[in-house]
Image (spheres, rainbow, N blue to C red):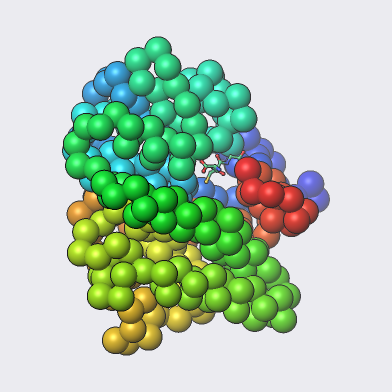
Amino acid sequence: MSTNGTTNGSNKELDPNQGGDANKKTYHKQPTGEALKTANAHSADNELTLYGSCFCPFVHRVWISLEHKGLPYAYREVDVYRKPKELTDINPRGLVPALRHGEWGSYESTVLMEYLEDLDKGKPLLPQDPKLRAESRLWSDHINRHIIPAFYRYLQAQDSEDQVKFAGQLREQIAKLVDAADPQGPFFLGDELTFVDVQLAPWIVRLGKVLKPYRGWPDPEPGSRWEKWVKAVEAAGPVQRTTSTDELYLDSYERYAENRPNTSQVREAINSGMQMP
Ligand SMILES: N[C@@H](CCC(=O)N[C@@H](CS)C(=O)NCC(=O)O)C(=O)O
C-alpha cells in the first residue's frame, strides 16, 4: 500500500466508502440472482418507474409491493452515492427509492407503498377494514421508528458491550411486533402477505444475510411464532423475486459492519443520534 492509502496509486475506481483501499468490500451496483432476473424482465420503459439500488432495504419494500400487485413497471438501478440527475430530479435529498409515474414523481418508501395502494390496481396490501388499516399503519410506524434504527445501531456498533445492548434492544422491539401479530399467522394479519409484512420483509432478509454473519444474530427459535413469520416472509414469491444472492448483502454491508466513514446518510444519523433520513 502506498503512503496515501491507495493500493495501486490510482483510486479513481474506488467508492468513497472504501477509504482508498481496494481490499475493502463495497456496495453492489447491479442485483444478482432472482432479483437480477426480475430487473431484466422490467428493463423496458414504463410510465411507472422505480429508481433503486439493489442493496437498499427501503427500495426492496417498494419493489416487493410492485411484484405483489403485479403492476407493469420499469426498474432502474442507480448508484445512489453518485446521485444521478434522474434520481435528484425526483428526490432532491438524493435517496432511493424514488418512483416516477408519468411526469410526476415522489419518494420515501412508506409514502410510495401508500401511493401504490391508492392507485387501487392489482392485489392490495392494506386490508379493507378501517381498524385493521389503522393498525397496519401503527405497526409500520413501530418498524420505522424502533426496529430499523435498532438494526443499524447493532450492525454499526464496534464495542462488544454496545453490541450486546443493541442486540437486546432489537430483540425487544421485534418481540413487541410479534406480540401484536395474529397468533396463528403465518403473516402479520393471518394467512396473507400484507402491508406490515412488506414493511418488515427487507430487514427479515437482512437479519439472516447480514446480522447473522456479521454479528451472530441467531436463527429464530424453532417452533416459535417468529420462526413461522420469518419462514413465510422469506418464502413469499414477491420477496424471493426481489432478493439477490447472499454475497451481494455480505459485500454491500461490510461498510456498515465496520462503521466506515463515508458509508451513507443512515450511518451518519445513527452515529450522531439524529433521526434517520
Ligand atoms: N426514509 C427513507 C430512507 C431511504 C434511504 O436511507 N436510502 C438509502 C439507501 S438504503 C440512501 O438513499 N442513501 C443515500 C445516501 O446515504 O446518500 C425511505 O424510507 O425511503
Say above or below: 147 vs 106: below
Q: Quadrant of residue 81?
A: top right
Nearer the observer, 196 or 204: 196
Nearer the observer, 82 or 10: 82
Give the tally of numbered discs: 0
Q: Quadrant of residue 54?
A: top left
Residue 12 spot, x, y in % from top left: 63, 35
Name of the residue lying farthest toward the bottom: 222
Quadrant containing the N terminus in the rendered view: bottom right
Q: Is residue 246 visible?
A: no
Q: Quadrant of ligand 1?
A: top right
Name of the residue lying farthest toward the right: 3
270 left or right, relative to 212: right
Residue 36 spot, x, y in % from top left: 28, 44
Say above or below: 2 vs 42: below
33 left or right, relative to 58: left
Residue 43 spot, x, y in % from top left: 26, 28
Name of the residue lying farthest toward the top: 103
Residue 101 spot, x, y in % from top left: 36, 21
Quadrant containing the C terminus in the rendered view: top right
Q: Could you tell me which residue is drawn at 46 percent across and 42 percent down?
A: 110
Q: Is residue 203 visible?
A: yes
Q: Could you tell me which residue is drawn at 58 percent across and 56 percent down?
A: 145
Say above or below: 24 vs 98: below
Q: Could you tell me which residue is drawn at 24 percent across and 43 percent down?
A: 124
